[in-house]
Amino acid sequence: MFGFSDETYIDVASGNGGHGCVSFRREKFVPKGGPDGGDGGRGGDVVFVVRSNLRTLGHLKLQRSFRAENGRPGQGARCAGRNGRDVEIPVPPGTVIRDAQTGELIKDLTDVDRYVFLQGGKGGLGNWHFRNAVRQAPKYAQPGFPGEEMRVGLELQIIADIGLVGFPNAGKSSLINLFTNARSKVAGYPFTTKIPVLGVLRDGDQDVIIADIPGIIEGASEGAGMGYKFLRHISRTKGLCYMVDLSADNCLEAYDILSSELAKYSEELAGKEHILIGTKIDEDGAEERFSELKAKYRNMKVLPLSIYMDDLVDDVRKALLELSGERKEEGFTSRMDTDAHYRDEA
Ligand SMILES: Nc1nc2c(ncn2[C@@H]2O[C@H](COP(=O)(O)OP(=O)(O)OP(=O)(O)O)[C@@H](O)[C@H]2O)c(=O)[nH]1
Ligand SMILES: [Mg+2]
């Protein structure tokens, strides 16, 4: 496997069954009523529920313990105890469940909506069941059956929604740091970023995953620089965000060079939906260069950016959300950013 993976573990427990009840009928004028103890309720199940608005396992690092409700004990008059409520664990599509101790695969939740992982314990039978000719007043009822407990490992391969593509020093890492939880190294020299970095842009309950990859340079497809080998990490994105440094002399040619290097890697990658961002518009002469850039690429979405100008930052944010496509759906809110890590085992 290669790419970004998110991993965590959680402790889960299904509910215990409720105890059966020992009870005898009490009625006026009936001195010795027969046994009427009801059965205990079933313990709740542990259920994994796949939610497509979730993209990481971040929320499961905040809550690690999931326990289903116990079944209630039976009662007199043959009343059964209430069943325990299931506990639902929301996970993103593609999550894999493993045994936390052995690492053994338990279940791959790709293409699954709901998965009952641990069943609750059965309820015990009430004393009513144990009456017979010999024993007419059993003082015995069955205890509930215990639920199961387990620590499980969860694993997810994360696929970015948007890939940032630009020459070294274009401001890619600055952008991902601005919009997401990522802390990608930023410095005023080329080739600062050496391995891809992922960040999660949060929009309501929707996560948009952005990938910052090392800069691409001319000749990358022939082995120049180092960004090229990371293109596969953005090959399954929904869209690309090209970034061009408006303070650099080659800013008008940059997009053509970048897109042709990408096309040499894969036509499909180069053909993805994209936007073009002119960065560092706060620098001298950058505004004029931006006008030329916009004029050159009329049928493309071209936006200016300075990480120091809030209104421009806002417009870029909106454009990125648009590029990632609408995936709105009602559901669970992921509350924490991921600490997904990069893995390259090719
Ligand atoms: N003036 C100005 N400088 C910026 C802006 N955005 C980024 N920079 C600076 O540009 C330099 C490069 O930024 P990075 O975000 O590291 O660029 P990068 O594209 O990730 O570079 P590599 O990782 O080397 O490919 C840093 O010194 C940033 O502070 C901006 O909007 N305005
Ligand atoms: Mg960088």
Image: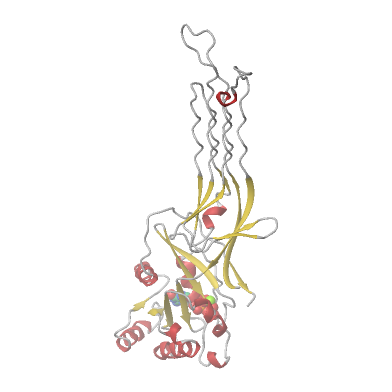
Say which of 304 and 94 sits in front: 94
Q: Residue 276: tell me if it is visible.
A: no
Look at the picture and state if 108 lies above or below 83: below
Colour scheme employed for the rendering of this structure: secondary structure
Say which of 120 and 326 sits in front: 120
Where's residue 273, x and y in %? 38, 79
- Residue at the extreme front of the image, as rendered: 133
Say which of 155 and 342 sits in front: 155
Q: Residue 35: tell me if it is visible.
A: yes
- Residue at the extreme top of the image, as rendered: 29
Residue at the location (57% across, 39% down)?
15
Look at the picture and state if 337 lies above or below 272: above
Residue at the location (52% across, 26% down)?
38
Where's residue 20, x and y in %? 57, 28
* Number of marks in picture: 0
> Residue 329's image quarter?
bottom left
Where's residue 183, x and y in %? 54, 67
Quadrant (top left/top right/bottom left/bottom right) for the N terminus: bottom right
Where's residue 208, x and y in %? 44, 66
Quadrant (top left/top right/bottom left/bottom right) for the C terminus: bottom right
